[in-house]
Image (cartoon, grey):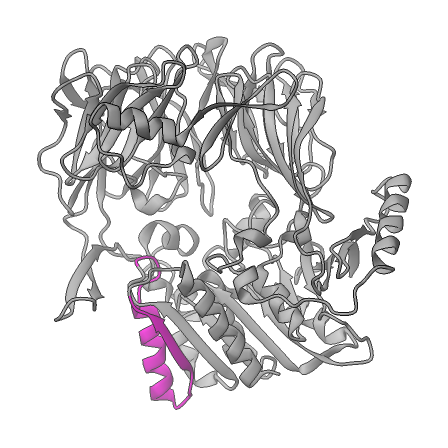
């Protein structure tokens, strides 16, 4: 076991860090002095957290969070949006108010326009740096407000609610979905353009497709000149209906969803291109769309060509294709990617602002997410732009046009950090843009000369800085410290253990009980997710703790969280070890974490619990059935029980089709091991879950009844895959009570 570094907050909210061999001596000394000063002033009575303080949806949750700034770029001008006022950052790095919400409402009333109930200043967009205008799109109103003239410059109302809005700043047109059909409208044009007429629950236009896999989050894509719109059309008439039930009606009614399960018939997707100038739609000539996926749509800078990835259903082969946007014809295949397990393109290509012949694309061909430079005229990859670093590129923010560099967020400094760099496209030199610590996320200005960096570290709750990407100088706009002064706060530490393969480092978070006594033996709860595209342990504030973990530590539990192989941001081989056997390798790693827990003298190994949601719910039940002698109690939320009941795109990527991998599906079908249950298990699910459908949980409960085992069951009618608002607080009350009743 390697102790990486630890975070501790005393009851007055002061932080001390023992980030071994990495924190400068003077900083460590300063932090020690601060911690000592705080310790001498601890009040006799410390406050305890409630779930209302720690869980989103709680009455006091927002007040207990570090202060934050809502910022947006208006070209290269930074704006701040509060509830009532919009500010601009001036040359002295102070905030100057430029307009207020009540002024917008007054302007709407002056034009005899009803003020929308869902109008929010924080939803303002600033699409054109040449105009002092803020754009607002609500469910029934599109309008622009000029804050210098204090008037509404253009507006359009909608007879029925609209959704999936996509605005083109180049042309001023808005694409939107209304009553299942796709429209285009401009505030200055009287009649909207209706692009489809057969839209329905079965024929879907302009919305996200393929169950939001492959990085897809929307269904419309404007050309750079704003004169053409590429959009998805999804035909899911051949997909079986899944019967969700609405119990809020006098007689419960069926509300079916289209849910293509692994191995079953999937939907067909095609792409149309509407040309405003010609008032016509052409369709990209992709051939037979059966069992094909289309993702990562982008335009060439001249608005004449469309690039996208075509992925086969087995998801082991992808092609980057170029289409003529005027005719829809396939012009050429730019590259292809294949892998024996799976490929997963998630990012559209990005053209260089100063060279329309070249674009940057993502690839894992080196084993890690890196960025590569491609030339259209030469038809080949020129070089890897981000090579020579350990770790992955997490985010590609854009370009600094003046320095001819790209701005990236990476794990190069540490597998559990996200750090910002400027990388020269000329020679590949990487220049750090932050302090080398913590977890950073950033927004780049239009010309890339500055970015807003919001970050935290184990000892820093949140800071928002503005950074010059040319010379890495930064100015702090907000340093937000802990709201936990006067509360009992547990010790949170981070470390590494070896995976079940004996060589790979895995990172964990360990939270000790409040008022920890090394002579006592405490119950412990393992919190687990364990699946792809997620991770739980990061070097952010409190090592990315969850509020419920703090609450459980306060109630006398040790809480342990481990990112096993299969989780994200550790490279291709680390992630795809799960292929065709979901749950198997992940459990082996989690049990290494359990071995660590059992070795700790203050952990009572006879009182071990486990809890997780979604993939973590699957892992929770899997652990309890595979190691019934280890876990006394568990709570599984929204669990996958049988991967053949899960959706095509996600399930088949990792498991192949059930008919092609019967052994893998059989090995981790939890119904087949329902008789192994020994400890107390609570299964929780949203009764209207469209992601992990209720059939999973209900079939497992039936299997347990048949096998003579006795899990407990809790459902939230009307809720989906997750609980929000007050339900989320209630949920964590239930989870806590279950562990209190059966583990403590």
* Residue 495 part of the magenta-drawn span: no
**Which quarter of the figure is the N terminus placed in?**
bottom right
Q: Is residue 648 above or below residue 153?
A: below
Residue 690 image point, x, y percent: 30, 58
Farthest residue, direction bottom:
708
Residue 263 image point, x, y percent: 29, 57
Residue placed at 77% from the left, 60% from the top? 10
Q: Is residue 423 above or below residue 568?
A: above
Magenta region, residue range: 690-717
Residue placed at 17% from the left, 21% from the top? 282
Residue 582 seen in the figure? no
Residue placed at 79% from the left, 77% from the top? 601
Residue placed at 14% from the left, 48% from the top? 237
Residue 267 image point, x, y percent: 22, 46
**Which quarter of the figure is the C terminus placed in?**
bottom right
Locate residue 621 relative to residue 701 in the image: left or right.
right
Locate residue 711 relative to residue 178 in the image: left or right.
right
Q: Is residue 652 above or below residue 592?
A: above
Q: Is residue 635 above or below residue 213?
A: below
Q: 231 or 23, which is in the foreground?
A: 23
Q: 558 or 669, which is in the foreground?
A: 558
- What is the quadrant of residue 124 in the picture? top left
Residue 162 image point, x, y percent: 22, 37
Locate residue 445 relative to residue 104 in the image: left or right.
right
Farthest residue, direction left:
197
Residue 631 seen in the figure? yes
């Amino acid at each position: 076991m390697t102790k990486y570094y630890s975070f501790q907050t005393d009851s007055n909210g002061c932080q001390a860090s023992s980030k071994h061999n990495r924190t400068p001596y003077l900083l460590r000394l300063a932090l020690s002095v601060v911690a000592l000063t705080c310790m001498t002033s601890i009040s006799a009575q410390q406050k305890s957290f409630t779930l209302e303080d720690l869980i989103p949806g709680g009455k006091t949750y927002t007040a207990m969070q570090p202060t934050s700034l809502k910022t947006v770029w208006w070209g290269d001008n930074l704006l701040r949006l509060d509830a009532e006022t919009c500010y601009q950052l001036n040359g002295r790095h102070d905030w100057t108010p430029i307009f207020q919400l009540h002024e917008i409402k007054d302007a709407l009333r002056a034009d005899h326009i009803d003020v929308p109930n869902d109008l929010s200043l924080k939803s303002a967009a600033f699409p054109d740096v040449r105009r002092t205008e803020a754009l607002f799109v609500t469910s029934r109103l599109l309008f622009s407000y000029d804050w210098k003239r204090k008037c509404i410059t253009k507006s359009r109302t909608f007879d029925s609610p609209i959704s999936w809005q996509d605005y083109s700043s180049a042309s001023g047109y808005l694409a939107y979905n209304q009553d299942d059909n796709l429209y285009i409208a401009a505030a200055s044009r009287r009649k909207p353009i209706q692009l489809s007429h057969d839209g329905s629950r079965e024929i879907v236009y302009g919305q996200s497709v393929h169950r939001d896999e492959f990085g897809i989050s929307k269904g419309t894509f404007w050309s750079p000149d704003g004169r053409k719109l590429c959009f998805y059309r999804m035909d899911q008439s051949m997909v079986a209906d899944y019967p969700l039930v609405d119990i809020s009606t006098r007689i419960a009614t069926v509300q079916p969803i289209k849910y293509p399960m692994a191995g079953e018939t999937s939907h067909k997707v095609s792409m149309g291109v509407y040309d405003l100038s010609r008032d016509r739609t052409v369709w990209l000539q992709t051939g037979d769309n059966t069992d094909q996926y289309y993702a990562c749509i982008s335009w060439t800078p001249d608005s004449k060509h469309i690039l996208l990835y075509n992925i086969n259903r087995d998801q082991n082969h992808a092609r980057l294709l170029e289409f003529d946007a005027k005719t829809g014809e396939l012009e050429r295949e730019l590259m292809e990617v294949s892998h024996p397990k799976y490929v997963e393109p998630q990012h559209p290509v990005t053209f260089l602002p100063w060279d329309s012949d070249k674009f940057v694309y993502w690839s894992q061909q080196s084993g890690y997410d890196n960025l590569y430079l491609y030339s259209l005229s030469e038809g080949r990859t020129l070089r890897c732009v981000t090579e020579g670093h350990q770790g992955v590129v997490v985010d590609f923010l854009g370009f600094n046009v003046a320095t001819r560099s790209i701005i990236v967020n990476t794990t190069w400094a540490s597998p559990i950090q996200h750090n910002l760099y400027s990388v020269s496209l000329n020679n590949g030199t990487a220049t750090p843009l932050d302090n080398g610590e913590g977890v950073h996320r950033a927004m780049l200005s239009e010309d890339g000369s500055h970015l807003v960096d919001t970050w935290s570290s184990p000892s820093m709750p949140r800071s928002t800085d503005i950074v010059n990407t040319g010379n890495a100088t930064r100015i702090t706009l907000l340093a937000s410290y802990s709201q936990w002064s006067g509360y009992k706060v547990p010790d949170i530490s981070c470390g590494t253990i070896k995976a079940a393969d004996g060589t790979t480092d895995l990172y964990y978070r360990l939270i000790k009980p409040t008022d920890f006594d090394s002579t006592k033996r405490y119950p412990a709860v393992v919190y687990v997710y364990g699946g792809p595209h997620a991770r739980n342990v990061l070097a952010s504030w409190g090592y990315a703790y969850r509020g419920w973990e703090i609450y459980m530590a306060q109630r006398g539990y040790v809480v342990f969280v481990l990112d096993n192989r299969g989780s994200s941001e550790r490279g291709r081989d680390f992630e795809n070890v799960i292929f065709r056997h979901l749950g198997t390798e992940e459990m082996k790693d989690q049990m290494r974490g359990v071995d660590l827990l059992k070795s700790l003298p203050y952990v009572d190994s006879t009182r071990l619990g486990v809890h997780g949601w979604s993939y973590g719910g699957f892992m929770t039940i899997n652990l309890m059935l595979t190691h019934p002698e280890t876990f006394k109690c568990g709570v599984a939320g929204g669990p996958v029980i049988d991967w053949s009941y899960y959706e095509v795109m996600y399930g088949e990527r990792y498991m192949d089709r059930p008919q092609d991998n019967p052994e893998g599906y059989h090995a981790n079908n939890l119904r087949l091991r329902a008789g192994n249950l020994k400890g107390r298990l609570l299964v929780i699910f949203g009764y209207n879950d469209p992601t992990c459908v209720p059939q999973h949980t209900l079939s497992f409960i039936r299997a347990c009844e048949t096998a003579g085992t006795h899990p407990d069951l809790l459902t939230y009618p009307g809720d989906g895959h997750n609980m929000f608002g007050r339900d989320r607080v209630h949920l964590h009350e239930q989870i806590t009570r279950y562990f209190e009743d059966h583990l403590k």
